[in-house]
Image: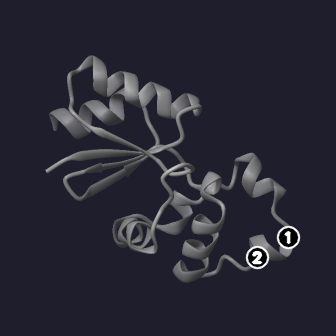
Amino acid sequence: MTITLYGIPNCDTVKKARTWLADRRQEFVFHDFKKQGLSREIVAGWLKQLSRDVLVNRKGTTWRALSDERKASIVDDEAAIALMLENPSVIKRPVLDQHGAFAVGFSDAQYQQIFNG
């Protein structure tokens, strides 16, 4: 089964994750969700393991640019899915899919635990 790293190529955290994986010769597929898009099925799959509060980056510029009404409307997974499909930049990056187990963000310690644990 393939490891997939979801994100956007110019994101510094995504760059660090890609470099970490490449340096350790971990084969992976990079999915640029701005260019390649995301499906409802992919995002819903993430939400089976991860909470919307983990996936939706409430500290980023995309979130801050939303109207207060739009922010307040994210009250359930369906609303979060709609927001993430409409504005993929609101997703905290990267999202790592390692054989159906998902992780969000990147740190050396986190990836060492995932890949060596």
Q: Residue 103 vs residue 59: left or right?
A: left
Helix, strand or loop status at disc 1: helix
Few, some or many residues within 10 Å of mark 1 (<14, 14–19, 20+) = few
The span from disc 1 to disc 2 (Cα, nearest Å) is 6 Å
In the image, residue 77 above or below residue 94: below
In contact (CB < 8 Å): disc 1 and disc 2: yes
**What residue lies at 46% left-to-right and 67% top-to-bottom?**
51
Q: What number is the disc on residue 58?
A: none
The kind of residue on which mark 1 rests is Asp
Few, some or many residues within 10 Å of mark 2 (<14, 14–19, 20+) = few
Count of numbered badges drawn on the protein: 2
In the image, residue 23 above or below residue 80: above
Of residues 103 and 22, the one nearer the viewer is 22
**What residue lies at 58% left-to-right and 34% top-to-bottom?**
11
Of residues 43 and 107, the one nearer the viewer is 43
Q: Which residue is mark 2?
A: 72
The kind of residue on which mark 2 rests is Ala
Residue 12 picture location, percent across and down: 57, 28
Q: What number is the disc on residue 68?
A: 1
Residue 13 picture location, percent across and down: 52, 32
Which quadrant of the view contains residue 91? Answer: bottom right
Q: Residue furthest top?
A: 23
Q: Residue 60 vs residue 81: left or right?
A: right
Q: Quadrant of the C terminus?
A: top left
**What residue lies at 24% left-to-right and 45% top-to-bottom?**
3
Q: Residue 33 vs residue 50: left or right?
A: right
Helix, strand or loop status at disc 2: helix
**What residue lies at 66% left-to-right and 61% top-to-bottom?**
87
Residue 90 picture location, percent across and down: 64, 55
